[in-house]
Image (tube, rainbow, N blue to C red):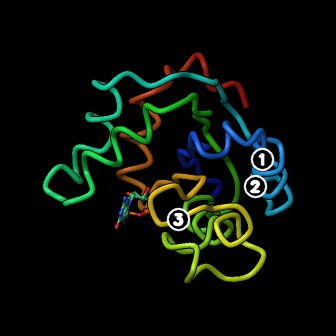
Amino acid sequence: MALERTFSIIKPDATRRNITGKVIAKLEEGGLRVVAQKRIHMTREQAEGFYAVHRERPFFGELVDFMMSGPVVVQVLEGEDAIKRNREIMGDTNPKDASPGTIRAEFAESIGENTVHGSDAPETAAVEIKFFFTDAEIVG
Ligand code: GDP
């Protein structure tokens, strides 16, 4: 299994409740390493651009408004099989379906305000990392 990188966001519902440390602990305990990280407040342009793939979905406006509603922590995670591993640690999109012990089961408030984002494939991980980080900002 190869060492892989994935992109992660700790969403505004988590920064608002001051639980970013608890979320990061779950990721680290799950075998992932934070190799780049910054706290930002997304602009509308960033939020719409990042979620452009969901533009036609009925919840797009709500999703963009939510992602701009407070600061987020964007990060690059590294580890064995990091993309799949991160999705396992996150749990299902809807916290009602998320397995016990996952971030979304423990912390998410709803299907929309669900605490974390994680890339779903190598191609999206590469694009999403580049959307927020330069190579020089990924420090291992
Ligand atoms: P993910 O890969 O598990 O994050 O899920 P998706 O790619 O399907 O959706 C992206 C994000 O859109 C989710 O993490 C939610 O924040 C949001 N989202 C998905 N479905 C809904 C919904 O039915 N209502 C709302 N308000 N937001 C949703």
Q: Secondary structure at mark 2?
A: helix
Q: Secondary structure at mark 1?
A: helix
40 vs 85, left or right, is: left
Q: Residues within 10 Å of mark 2 (few under 14, many from 20)?
A: many
Q: Quadrant of residue 90?
A: bottom right
Q: Which residue is mark 3?
A: 110
x, y percent for residue 26? 80, 58
Q: Residue at x 58, y 47 (%)?
A: 5
Marks 2 and 1, Cα distance to the nearest angstrom?
5 Å
Pointers 2 and 1 in contact (CB under 8 A)? yes
x, y percent for residue 127? 36, 40
Quadrant of the frame with the N terminus: bottom right
- Of the residues shown, which amino acid type is indicated by label 2? Leu
Q: Nearer the viewer, residue 75 or 91?
A: 91
Q: Residues within 10 Å of mark 3 (few under 14, many from 20)?
A: some
Q: Which residue is mark 2?
A: 27
Q: Nearer the viewer, residue 8 or 110?
A: 110
Quadrant of the frame with the C terminus: top right
**Residue 24: which numbered mark, if any?**
1
Q: Residue at x 63, y 72 (%)?
A: 88
48 vs 23, left or right, is: left
User: Which residue in the rendered view is the most extreme toward the left?
Assistant: 56
- The reply to whether the residue tagged 3 has its Cβ within 8 angstroms of ligand 1 is yes
Marks 1 and 3, Cα distance to the nearest angstrom?
20 Å
Q: Residue at x 73, y 40 (%)?
A: 34
